[in-house]
Amino acid sequence: MAQRLRQWVGHQRFIYNAKVDEDRYFAGMRLSMLARGRTAAEAATPLDRAYAQFRGETTPWLGEVPSQVLRIGAERWFEGKQRQLKGLARAPRRRNRLNFDSVRVSSELFEFRELDEPQGDLRHELVLGNDKFGFGSLPFTAHRPYEVPKSLTLRCTGGQWFVSFSYEHAAPKGFVARNEEELAYELDLLDGPALETRTLGLDRNVADNCLATSDGRFYALSAVQKARIARKAVGAKRHQRRLARQEKGSANSRKTRDRLARKLAYKREVLRDFSHQTSHDLLESKANDAGVPQLLVLEALKVGNMTARPKARQDETGRWLRNGAASKAGLNRAILSSAWGRIAEQLGYKAARRNVLVLQVPAAYSSQECSRCGHTHPGNRDAQRFACQRCGLEAHADTNAARIIAGRGIGMVRDQKVVVKARKRVAYRRRATNAGLESPDVPVEGGVSRDEAKADIAQCPRKQEGATTTAPSGV
Ligand SMILES: [Zn+2]
């Protein structure tokens, strides 16, 4: 079964790459036609999901997989191309085994079946393939109701196959999503104690890799998970050394690489699970024993800055000094393994579904400030204990910091400083000289027919295509 699936991955990748090549060829042709003074309409080349032109006498093996697998290869390229045309990404590139390791299948090629189990636990089964290419099933336990997706993705990582799919959550009846400003306005109408009980502050402790809430709860990985992560890190190092000694591309090195990937995958999966459980629990459990929180306040940390390498240091004679890079490396590991960024991101979209406001506040001195009287002094804190030197408040240092953060969030609401954030668009823009040629308002049909192109592609070596694409040709 695994071998068959690998074949599906390879065939889907082949179609994807063929579309990439075809597109580059068309781009070059369009440029040269425009350079010869033809109008944009005359120089238009096909832009579609067609893939039948790649099946022929030289590629009889394409018939060994269901045509849906090939079709989705073209579709995956087309989605990438659309992203490029919208200015959201670079042009789709040729992919290889390492960066195209999954196959997406449509609903014609899979089916979910319910199995009858006398014990009551509902077992399900995922059946893959169709009448002609059926090849197996995968039993699983559904832990919550799910909808059958339109497509699913099968990916091989470290010699193991994973199935993933997603479907849209239907909003509950009567749900109207509100933006940050509207939510903050509603919260500002509450009186002091009411707002306080509905607010939850979060403090992140990097050294202990745990998360503290302003109502005294803590979230951390279990001791068993931490021990396993540490053990697997040791194992991964051993495999890395072994891999370095093995002959590249040999069967043994492939085996080692798979084992190495599985060692590294454990930590990733544990942290993913942890961040989902934590973000869900923060939104669903009662804050301050009142109700589910309406306002979550996080410390705004620039993870990128904190994980940057410390500067190299020299004394007057030019001798290199210790710059603390080794200890910083340990801290970096702790920051990254605390999965903070992911928890913040998941809180963002999970809160939006529930009309809960999430704010980020500066965390400066939150570990030294007293949450009762506001006295700020480094002496207030002694490791994990917080003891205020002025009013005598005693608390867990992280809980106190989380309360400070909650208070700063409330301050933002009261001062009406919450504004709607502009949606961030991550975009690569094409250089201005090329932009007009790839823009979507160029008519896509007409000009060059695919049959002419096919004949040309067969004759034209790829290197020349590249040359014509990059030449500006005076446009
Ligand atoms: Zn105090």
Image (cartoon, grey):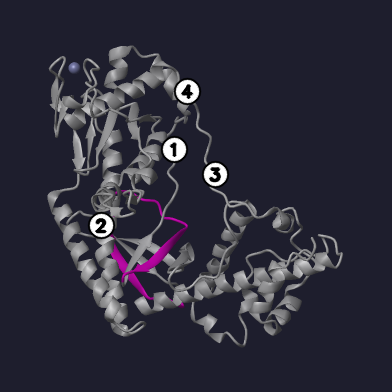
Circle number at residue 267 = 2
Helix, strand or loop at label 1? It is: loop
Of residues 243 and 427, the one nearer the viewer is: 243
The circle on residue 171 is 1
For the residues labelled 1 and 3, the Cα–Cα distance comes to 24 Å
Sequence-wise first label, 3 or 4: 4
Q: Does the residue labelled 2 lie within 8 Å of ligand 1?
A: no
Label annotation for residue 138? none
Q: Does the magenta stretch include residue 139?
A: yes
User: Which percent across, then down, holds residue 235?
Assistant: 19, 67
Residue designated by label 3: 425
Task: Give the magenta part as a residue range.
Answer: 131-158
Mark 3, residues whose alpha carbon is within 10 Å: few (<14), some, or many (≥20)? few
Q: In which quarter of the image is the N terminus?
A: bottom left
Going by the numbered disc 1, the residue's amino acid type is Ala
Residue lying at the far bottom in this picture: please name it. Answer: 57
Q: Which of marks 2 and 4 is nearer the N terminus?
A: 4
- Give the residue pinned by disc 4: 182
| Distance from Cα at disc 3 to Cα at disc 4 | 23 Å
Say what amino acid the circle numbered 2 marks. Lys
Residue at disc 3, secondary structure? loop
Residue closer to the observer: 406 or 124? 406
**Badge 4: how crowded within 10 Å, few (<14), some, or many (20+)?**
some
| Mark 1 neighbour density, 10 Å: few (under 14) some (14–19) many (20 or more) | few
- In this orientation, does residue 234 appear? yes
